Structure formats: structure tokens, C-alpha cells
Image (tube, grey):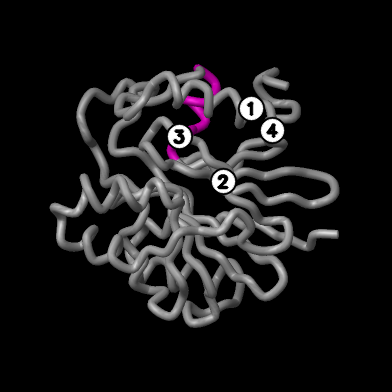
Amino acid sequence: MSEAQLDVLAIGTLARNRFWDEETDVREEFATVSLVRSGKAVIVVDPGWPAEVLEAVLYYRSGLRPETVTHVFLTHVEPAHLRGIGAFAKAKWLAYGEEIVYARSELCGDPAVAAVVARLVEAPEKLAPGVDIFPTPGHSPGHTSLMVNTPVQTTIVAGDAVLTRDHLEHGDLGPTVYDREAAGESFQELLEVADFLVPGHDNLQWLRSGFGFL
């Protein structure tokens, strides 16, 4: 029986949200940051907020300090999803293998991103009991969500495969997609599999009753 537990540490936001009638960037963009615990594994997913914010929310939401984090998992390589990763210098930094290859060839023009990519290790299929990677390509070639299973529910940290609640409700993939067909397939697969879903830039969403998807 899995004892995996998921908590949202910090709720992200988009620089602009067209469903709020925003046509230009009006705020700084941050990813939603999640904490997954199972067995001896303490995993932070998409540490996009500044390091000092992550240190504070980790303590206030879980009582933990950065040095207790064993792994950081990136759903994909993007500044808004990795800005504060340096707070977890003692952890192993993970991403899907295909995303690492893509990042090394296409995304290392920014020195800060290049330094992160240089430390990334290919994630195994299972990170901990009840915690598995769930490839959701489309937003980027190697975009990968994280599936957290317990005997009664499946929660998926979706990264930018689903941007926000608004995008979820409207079936919208967002304006910037590497492969729109693959992204659409990933979006639909998430709706079929997840009971709960954490979008890349919003709070936890309950799919079982909301929106009539399942």
C-alpha cells in the first residue's frame, strides 16, 4: 500500500491569462510548486519561485528544511519552473531523458538554465513507492508529469500539459506548444487518468466531479 502524499507548496500564475482578458504580460510568471513524500523520498516538483520563497513555504507547509529534500523533479526545462532550484543543492535533480536531450541542444543559451541542465539526471520510471513519471509530450518534446498513486486516488502534477483551471475548463493547450497534436493527446490522457490534477500555474483541481470530464 502506497503512503505517498502530495501537498501544493506555492500556487503559480501566468504572466498573462487570455481568459482574464489580458493581452500583454502583466505579472511575473511562476510555476506551481508541489511537494511529494513517499517512503524516504522527499520530492519538490517544479521549484519555480525564488529560493527564499521556497525555503519559507516548505517550512510553513511541511515543517521541512531544504536540506531534507532528496529529489527535485522538473516536468520540463523552463525558467518559470526552475528559478529557485538552487535552494535544494543537496538533492538529486531529475527530468525525463528526452527533455534533458532537448534542453541540452536547444535551451542552454541562458547561463542560468545551462547550469541547471548540466546537473540534471534522467528520472527513473518510479521515483518512490506510488510515485511514477507520466510522459505528457507536446508542450515540449520531453514534457513529463508526475503521477502520485494511493489505493483510493490518483493525483497528477501536470506541469504545463494543463496550464490553469481556465485552460482545463476550456480545453485550451495554451499559446506556446512545441507539438500541438501531441499536447492534445496528453491533455486528454490526463483527464482520463487523474482524479486530482495540479496544473502548471494554478491550484489543485478535482476532476472526478468538476467540469463533467469523467
Let me know if residue 159 is in the magenta part. no
Q: Is residue 93 left or right of residue 35?
A: left
Say which label, 2 or 3, has the lower sequence index. Answer: 3
Which of the two marks, 2 or 3, is nearer to us in this view? 3
Q: Nearer the viewer, residue 123 or 16?
A: 123
Crowd band around label 1 with a 10 angstrom C-alpha radius: few (<14), some (14–19), many (20+): some
Gap in angstroms between the C-alphas marked 1 and 4:
6 Å
Gap in angstroms between the C-alphas marked 2 and 1:
12 Å
Q: Nearer the viewer, residue 71 or 50?
A: 71
Residue under numbered circle 4: 193
Amino acid type, mark 3: Pro
Provide the residue span drawn in magenta.
160-170
Say which label, 2 or 1, has the lower sequence index. Answer: 2
Q: CB atoms at circles 3 and 1 under 8 Å apart?
A: no
Q: Secondary structure at mark 2?
A: strand
Q: Residue 62 is drawn in which quadrant?
A: bottom right
Q: Secondary structure at mark 1?
A: helix
Residue under numbered circle 2: 157
Q: CB atoms at circles 1 and 4 under 8 Å apart?
A: yes
Residue under numbered circle 1: 191
Q: Is residue 163 left or right of residue 82?
A: right
Residue ID at (47%, 77%): 66
Gap in angstroms between the C-alphas marked 2 and 3:
14 Å
Gap in angstroms between the C-alphas marked 2 and 4:
12 Å
Residue 23: x and y in percent read: 23, 23
Amino acid type, mark 2: Val
Residue ID at (15%, 55%): 110
In this rendering, is residue 196 above or below 185? below
Say which label, 2 or 4, has the lower sequence index. Answer: 2
Q: Residue 36 is drawn in which quadrant?
A: bottom right
Residue under numbered circle 3: 137
